[in-house]
Amino acid sequence: MAFRYVRVWTKPRFSKFLGLGILVIFGLFLLNAHFRHLVSLPDNVPIVAMLFLVAFFTWLSLSRGAENDMRKEAGQPTLEEEDNGSEKVFVWPNLVFVEFIASIVGSIVLIAWSILLKAPLEEPANVSNTPNPSKAPWYFLGLQEMLVYYDPWLAGVVFPTLIIVGLLAIPYIDRNPKGNGYFTVKERSFSIMTFFFGFHVLWVFMIIGGTFLRGPGWNFFGPFEVWNPHKVVPLLNVNLSDIIYVKMLGMALPKSWLVREIWGLLLIGGYFSMLPVIFTKLPAVQLPWFGKLDISGFFKKLRVSCGSVRYYLTVFLILCLMSLPIKMVLRWFFNLKYIVTIPEFFFNI
């Protein structure tokens, strides 16, 4: 919906009301003592500041992209073309002077920050007293949150590798020359939406959850809920094989790991092999407030423009992104821990 109506909510007049509404809501949240204490911790202050910066630069990039799209439709030059045509400066002294002033301002901010906020240092490490909750630095909290839903070999090795390899592969997968040198939304909507989903929905949201919503015992706490160190939440971890054999068929789990996990293996295999084909067969649907959604038409065009190899690689990376929210929903609502669990080989998915 945000991309569907990007030209509406990025307009300055609408954006002012949107930004003011966010500040008002945040101010009302600060009336709660626990929330105010949580966001004012020295560890969390830079994270709160970065959240506002992410929101601002998201609006800035999308607003410039929407403006450029309207300009190109009207036959006018883009904002970047106007800037490059009207203002050209030398690196010395113009750019170096601006960078020097920026470094001075940054140093002043850091000095004031170090004076006003205490460094988040704790007492010396004690092997008999583990911090509760024991958290990684904020930039690793996304990975630590993924460990709740995935085995360590997936959350700590496979997915970070896919993130790095996927980022490196983007220029070779997406060869669309449009959007180089200027902001746009319409001409690169698929790439932008995929990036925003992976960065905002998954990574930023996981950091927020790990920072503000995970308390003692790594339990989930609401934004206004006091962190009770004695909170105990009974959680029954259920695997897919337990649901099929024990609950549905009313029998004990087979001793053979292949027979026991064949359904999960087929499900995972079908997820990555069948969905790229199914995406090109889905009928168009009419959604309220959105309009016509033609998924199959989009993926057919993507397959023609990319070719079979790059198409399947693109969809594979997208399915890997989608697997995380799917696994989170299965864990939250059905207590489903693993779709495939083979302890004989330490292999769990």
Image: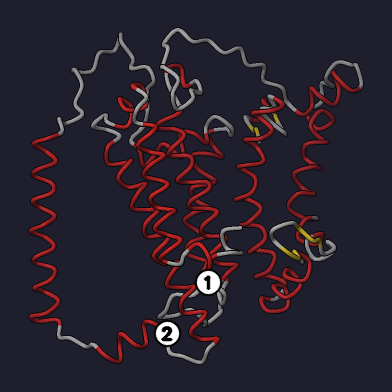
Where is residue 190 shown, x and y percent of the image? 60, 67
Distance between the alpha carbons at the discs numbered 1 and 2: 13 Å
Vertical order, 171 against 217 (above or below):
below
Q: Quadrant of the C terminus?
A: top right
Amino acid residing under circle 1? Val
Mark 1 surroundings within 10 Å by alpha-carbon count, few (fewer than 14), some (14 through 19), many (20 or more):
many
Per the image, label 1 sits on a secondary structure element best described as: loop
Amino acid residing under circle 2? Thr
Residue 251 position by quadrant: top right
* Total count of labels: 2
Where is residue 347 shown, x and y percent of the image? 64, 33
Q: Quadrant of the N terminus?
A: bottom right
Residue 254 position by quadrant: top right
Identified at 92% across, 21% down, the residue is: 249
User: Residue 155 versus residue 83: which sits nearer the camera?
Assistant: 83
Identified at 49% across, 75% down, the residue is: 184
Judge left or right: residue 316 versus residue 287.
Answer: left
User: Residue 320 versus residue 189: which sits nearer the camera?
Assistant: 189
Per the image, label 2 sits on a secondary structure element best described as: loop
Task: Please name the residue that numbered disc 1 is placed on.
Answer: 185
Which residue extends farthest right? 249
Judge left or right: residue 192 versus residue 305.
Answer: left
Where is residue 287 shown, x and y percent of the image? 76, 58
Vertical order, 4 against 270 (above or below):
below
Residue 78: which numbered mark, if any?
2
Where is residue 39 shown, x and y percent of the image? 32, 32
Colour scheme in use: secondary structure
Identified at 17% across, 86% down, the residue is: 89
Residue 203: which numbered mark, if any?
none
- Sequence-wise, the earlier of marks 1 and 2 is 2
